[in-house]
Amino acid sequence: MSSNQKLSKFLRAIGIILMAFTAGFTFLGGAGTTCVALNPTGFSSSMAALASMQWLYIFFVLSGVALGILGIRAVIQLIRGKPNAYRFSVVILVAGTILGLVHIFTSRALRGKSMPVDAVVYVTAFTLAVFLLFKIPGIWRIVDFSRGKPSENKPAGGAASILLGILAISIQYLMGASHTWGGVNYADAFHLSMWIVGVACFITGLALLSPISLNRIRLHQSVKTQ
C-alpha cells in the first residue's frame, strides 16, 4: 500500500470517528434536554427561567435527537463510500452548529448560562471545521470519501462504534456536574438504557475490529489485487 493510500485511509478514519462522536454527543444532548423541556420549573430557579420558552426547548429536544440520528446515518454513508455522504455530513454539521448557537444564546439570555449545550456545539463546530478542511483541493484528492471502500473503512467504523459505546456509558459522569440539582444527577436518568446501548456499541465495535474481520478485509484486498 502506498503512502498516499495509507494517508487516505487515515484521514477518512479521522472523519468517520469525529462524525460518529459528534452524532452521538448531539443525540445525547437532545435527549438530555428532555427533563428541563418538559418540566422547567421542577429543578432549580435557574432552570425555571426557561418556562417562558418551553416550546422552544421542546423543539431543541426533537431537533437534537433528529440531528443525532441523521448524523449516525451520515456515518454509515461515509463508511460505505456513498457519493453524497460528505455533503450530507456537512449539512448535518452546519444545522447542528446553528441550532446549538441558538440554544446557547437563548439559555444565556434566560438564565445567564448555557452549559452543557456549549460542549456539544464546540464538538460540532470542530468537526465541521475539519470536514471543511477536507474540501481543500489538495486534501480532497486524498480523502474523497466516495473513493473509500467499505472494507477499508470497516476498522474506522469499529473504532467509532467503540467510542460511541464509551460515550453512552460515561455520559452520566461527564455531564454530572452540570446536571445535578438537589444532590440528584439527572444525567443518569436513563442509566439502564445507556448501559445497554453502550455495551451493544462496544461489542459491535470489537466485532468489526476482530482479527477474523480484519483478515477478511485483507483477503478481500489481496484477491482484488491479483
Image: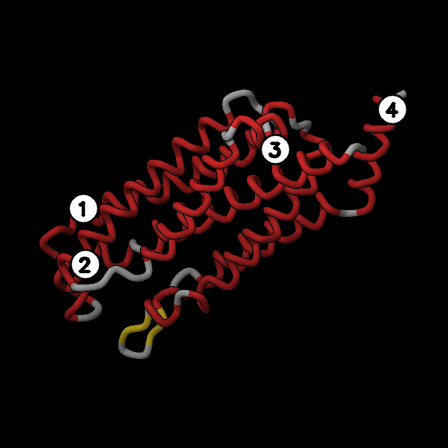
Res 26 label: none
Sooner in the amino-acid sequence: mark 1 or mark 4: 1
In the rendered image, the vertical position of residue 191 relative to residue 219, given as above or below: below
The residues tagged by marks 4 and 3 sit, at their Cα atoms, a distance apart of 21 Å
- Residue that badge 2 annotates: 108
Mark 3, Cα crowd under 10 Å, few <14 / some 14-19 / many 20+, is many
Mark 4, Cα crowd under 10 Å, few <14 / some 14-19 / many 20+, is few
Q: Does any portion of residue 145 appear in the rendered image?
A: no
The residues tagged by marks 3 and 2 sit, at their Cα atoms, a distance apart of 38 Å
x and y, in percent, of residue 83 in the image: 55, 20
* Secondary structure under the numbered disc 1 in the rendered image: helix
**Three-letter amino acid code of the residue under disc 2:** Arg
Res 223 label: 4
**Three-letter amino acid code of the residue under disc 1:** Leu
Q: Which residue is drawn at 71% across and 43% down?
A: 208
- Residue that badge 1 annotates: 56
Q: Quadrant of the C terminus?
A: top right
- Residue that badge 3 annotates: 79
x and y, in percent, of residue 90 in the image: 43, 33
Q: Residue at x 78, y 40 (%)?
A: 213
In the rendered image, the vertical position of residue 92 relative to residue 204, given as above or below: above
Sooner in the amino-acid sequence: mark 3 or mark 1: 1
